[in-house]
Image (cartoon, rainbow, N blue to C red):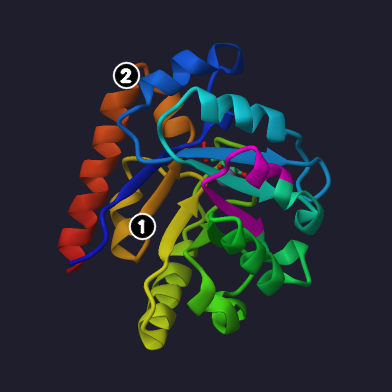
Amino acid sequence: MSDPIQIAPSILAADYARISEELAQVSSADLIHFDVMDGHFVPNISFGADFLRAVKASTDLPVDAHLMVSNPDEVVEKFLDAGADSLSFHYEATAHAHRLVSLIHDRGARASIAINPATPVCLLEPILDDLDMVLVMTVNPGFGGQRFIDSSLKKLRRLRRMCDEHGVNPRIEVDGGIDAGNIAAVAAAGANVFVAGSSVFGCEDRSRAIAELRGAAEGGVTKSA
Ligand code: DX5
Ligand code: ZN
């Protein structure tokens, strides 16, 4: 049986001034996705570790931190100290991916590597067995509300095949442009954790948006089985 679908609303698209109410409205989700942008690795600046601590104190859901920063080696511990439950750093941003994964595990968190749209999945092969999750960017990182890149589907299928060949089953997370119209195809291609910013916080009824995404993703998995 395949792993349950997880929906991870990205608070990048939330109203930051009302963050605890926003978090309360997405309590039917599985994870809270927390985007860290440094204005250097990506052309935008978002949140730091202190805000993660505040978010963590305002939700019962696990916090899934996504570090879009040039220096993950230097800052990863700050986000672990702040309470991140899972942590994705970018493959493109470090020469020491294995060391970082070990550090995240030593601190009791779940370790994940994120890859940009132009980064091939085969680069993860030597480290695949050590990962709890792989984050496949389905837009170029930096902004919410962008259009899903269609060639990501091929990449997801390739990653799923590579995992099968290795006999491992990390979570496969997708991030960017996920909505009720494409989530079934993305699930059928092998993803099982879905970040959703605009398609959750852009809707009046957030629990309904989450339920719709979940239902459509489950439908996609069933159809592909
Ligand atoms: C983009 C971020 C995403 C973003 C997704 O760089 O990593 O997590 O919030 O937003 P949507 O779902 O609106 O594309
Ligand atoms: Zn993200």
Residue at image coords 45%, 44%: 195
Q: Where residue 211 appears, x then y in whole percent?
A: 24, 34
- The quarter of the image holding the N terminus is bottom left
Q: Residues within 10 Å of mark 1 (few under 14, many from 20)?
A: many
* Closer to the eye: label 2 or 1: 2
Q: Which residues are magenta?
A: 78-89
- Whether residue 60 appears in this view of the structure is yes
Helix, strand or loop for disc 2? loop
Whether 37 is drawn above or below 136: the answer is above
Q: Quadrant of ligand 2?
A: top right
- Using residue 160 as the reference point, say whether residue 11 is left or right of it: right
User: Total number of numbered labels?
Assistant: 2
Helix, strand or loop for disc 1? helix
Q: Quadrant of residue 43?
A: top right
Q: Nearer the viewer, residue 186 or 65?
A: 65
Residue at image coords 55%, 61%: 112
Residue identifier under label 2: 205
Separation of disc 2 and disc 1 at Cα?
Answer: 23 Å
Q: Does the magenta segment cover residue 46?
A: no
- Using residue 160 as the reference point, say whether residue 110 is left or right of it: right
Q: Nearer the viewer, residue 115 or 129?
A: 129
Q: Where residue 76 appears, x then y in whole percent?
A: 71, 51
The three-letter code of the residue at mark 2 reads Asp
Residue at image coords 60%, 56%: 107
Q: Which mark is residue 186?
A: 1
Q: Nearer the viewer, residue 170 or 83?
A: 83
Residue at image coords 54%, 18%: 19
Q: Nearer the viewer, residue 204 or 28?
A: 28
Task: Say whether mark 2 is within 8 Å of ligand 1.
Answer: no
